[in-house]
C-alpha cells in the first residue's frame, strides 16, 4: 500500500507540473473517498493543498466528519456554505418551469440534488482559479463504472486518482493513510437528501460491484443492474487524466 500511495502522490505532482500549476483542491464531504483524496493531495503538496467544505443543508454528523478528516491530515481548509445559494437558484428555476406548467414532481428531488453537485463543482473551480490549483475528483472504480456521479458536478474535475481502485481498496488505503476509523467504515452516502444512501440509490452494493469488476461471480440480478447502470451512464465518462497502476 505504501508503494501504491507513493506512486499516486508522484503522479499528482507530475500532473500539476505538466499543467503549470502549484497545488490541488478537493471538496471534503466527510465521506471515505474525499477523505482519502484529501490525505493524498496533502502528501503531494504539503503547503499547496486545500480541502473545501461546501454544506447545502448538510447533516451535522457529516460536517463533524469533514472536520475530522481535515484534522487527521492537517490540510488547509475553507468553508463555503451554499445552502442559500442552492435554495434561491433552484426556487427560481422551478418557478419558471411551473409558469410553463411543465414542472415534474417525479424528477424534482434528483434535479435539486444534481444542482447541489454542480454548485459545488463551480465553487471548487472558482477557488482553484484563485490559488492556481487543479481540482481533484474522488470517484472510485465502482462509481466510475456505474456512472454514480453527477455529470459536470462531482464528475467535473481535472484529475481522477482513485478511478482504478475498488471501494474495498479505497477503504484499505484510507486505513493506511490514517483516516478516522468511523469514516472508513461509515455507510456511503452523498448526503443529497435526508437518509439518502449510495447503495439504496444504485440498487446494489459496493461489495457486489467490486466483485463484478474483479471478475468474480455475482447474481444475475446484480449483474443486470450493474451492466444497465454502465450502459446508461456511458455519456458521463469523458476522457480525464486518470491514474493507472504500474
Image: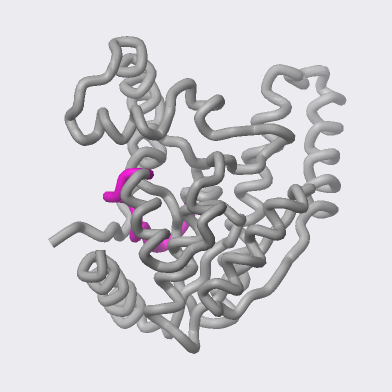
Residue that lies at the very extreme toward the bottom in this rendered image: 47
Measured as percent of width and height from the top left, residue 68 is found at: 62, 66
Q: Is residue 101 above or below residue 126?
A: above
Q: Residue 232 falls in which quadrant of the image?
A: top left
Task: Check the image and name the residue furthest to the left.
Answer: 246
Image quadrant of residue 92? Answer: top right
**Vertical placement of 136 versus 48: above or below?**
above
Q: Main secondary structure of the magenta part?
A: loop
Q: Which residues are magenta?
A: 156-167
Q: How is the image coloured?
A: one colour
| Residue farthest along the front direction in this orientation | 181
114 vs 82, left or right, is: left
Residue 192 drawn at (x, y percent): 66, 40
Residue at 65% over, 42% down: 191
Residue at 83% in and 45% down: 87
Q: Quadrant of the N terminus?
A: bottom left
Nearest the eye: 212 or 100? 212
Examine the rendered structure and indicate whether residue 136 appears above or below residue 55: below
> Residue at coordinates 59% horizontally, 80% vertically from top-left?
76
What x and y, as percent, mark residue 118? 61, 49
* Between 71 and 14, the one nearer to me in the picture: 71
Q: Is residue 127 left or right of residue 223?
A: right
Residue 242 lies in the magenta stretch: no
Quadrant location of the C terminus in the rendered image: bottom left
Amino acid at each position: 500500500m505504501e508503494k501504491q500511495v507513493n506512486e499516486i502522490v508522484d503522479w499528482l505532482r507530475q500532473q500539476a507540473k505538466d499543467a503549470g500549476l502549484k497545488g490541488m483542491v478537493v471538496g471534503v464531504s466527510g465521506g471515505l473517498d474525499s477523505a482519502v483524496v484529501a490525505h493524498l493531495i496533502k502528501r503531494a503538496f504539503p503547503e499547496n493543498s486545500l480541502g473545501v467544505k461546501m454544506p447545502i443543508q448538510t447533516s451535522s454528523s457529516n460536517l463533524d466528519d469533514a472536520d475530522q478528516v481535515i484534522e487527521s491530515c492537517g490540510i488547509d481548509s475553507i468553508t463555503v456554505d451554499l445552502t442559500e445559494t442552492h435554495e434561491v437558484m433552484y426556487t427560481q428555476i422551478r418557478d419558471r418551469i411551473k409558469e410553463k406548467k411543465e414542472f415534474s414532481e417525479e424528477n424534482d428531488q434528483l434535479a435539486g440534488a444534481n444542482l447541489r453537485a454542480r454548485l459545488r463543482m463551480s465553487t471548487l473551480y472558482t477557488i482553484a482559479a484563485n490559488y492556481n490549483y487543479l481540482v481533484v475528483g474522488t470517484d472510485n472504480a465502482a462509481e466510475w463504472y456505474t456512472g454514480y456521479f453527477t455529470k459536470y458536478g462531482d464528475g467535473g474535475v481535472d484529475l481522477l486518482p482513485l478511478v482504478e481502485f475498488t471501494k474495498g481498496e479505497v477503504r484499505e488505503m484510507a486505513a493506511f493513510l490514517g483516516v478516522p476509523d468511523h469514516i472508513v467504515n461509515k455507510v456511503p452516502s452523498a448526503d443529497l437528501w435526508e437518509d439518502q444512501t449510495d447503495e439504496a440509490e444504485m440498487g446494489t452494493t459496493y461489495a457486489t460491484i467490486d466483485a463484478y469488476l474483479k471478475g468474480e461471480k455475482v447474481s444475475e440480478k446484480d449483474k443486470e443492474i450493474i451492466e444497465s447502470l454502465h450502459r446508461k451512464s456511458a455519456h458521463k465518462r469523458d476522457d480525464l487524466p486518470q491514474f493507472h497502476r504500474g
